[in-house]
Image (spheres, rainbow, N blue to C red):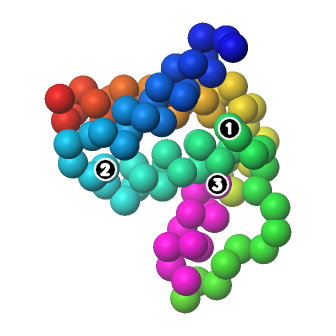
Amino acid sequence: MDELTLAFERSQQEVKQLPSRPSNDQLLSLYGLFKQATQGDVTGSAPSVFKMAEHAKYQAWKALIGTDSEECKQRYVELVQSLVRQQG
């Protein structure tokens, strides 16, 4: 397993151990980066705007269409590291 993948997996555990919950925008960024890194481009139609949480998550993922998996992993790791520093 390469170093980036190990850092990505470590970051997934670190984010769960943060002392306080990240902001909604930070959570959406984490979600979109994680999904793009692990599943690639979003498919299907956006959920109804009346399902606000699902719609926001879809939009966060959709904003990353075409972004390489490795780039998303790196950005995810960097975001988690910044959250750890902020809350540390």
Residue located at (69% from left, 25% from top): 70
The secondary structure type at the circle numbered 2 is loop
Q: Is residue 62 above or below residue 5?
A: below
Within 10 angstroms of label 3, few (less than 14), some, or many (20 or more) residues?
many
Residue 49 occupies quadrant: bottom right
Residue located at (37% from left, 59% from top): 24
Residue closest to the far bottom: 50
Image quarter of the N terminus: top right
**Left or right: 24 in relation to 56:** left
**Left or right: 85 in relation to 13:** left
N-terminal-most mark, 1 or 2: 2
Residue located at (21% from left, 48% from top): 20
Cα distance between the residues tagged 1 and 3 = 10 Å
* Disc 2: which residue: 22
* Disc 3: which residue: 61
Q: Is residue 57 above or below residue 9?
A: below
Q: Nearer the viewer, residue 7 or 48?
A: 7
**Left or right: 40 in relation to 84:** right
Q: State yes or no: residue 53 in magenta.
A: yes
N-terminal-most mark, 1 or 3: 1
Q: Position of residue 58 (x, y in %)?
A: 63, 64
Which region shows up in magenta?
A: 51-61
Amino acid type at image mark 1: Ala
Q: Are marks 1 and 2 in contact (CB under 8 Å)?
A: no
Amino acid type at image mark 2: Pro
Image quarter of the C terminus: top left
* Disc 1: which residue: 37
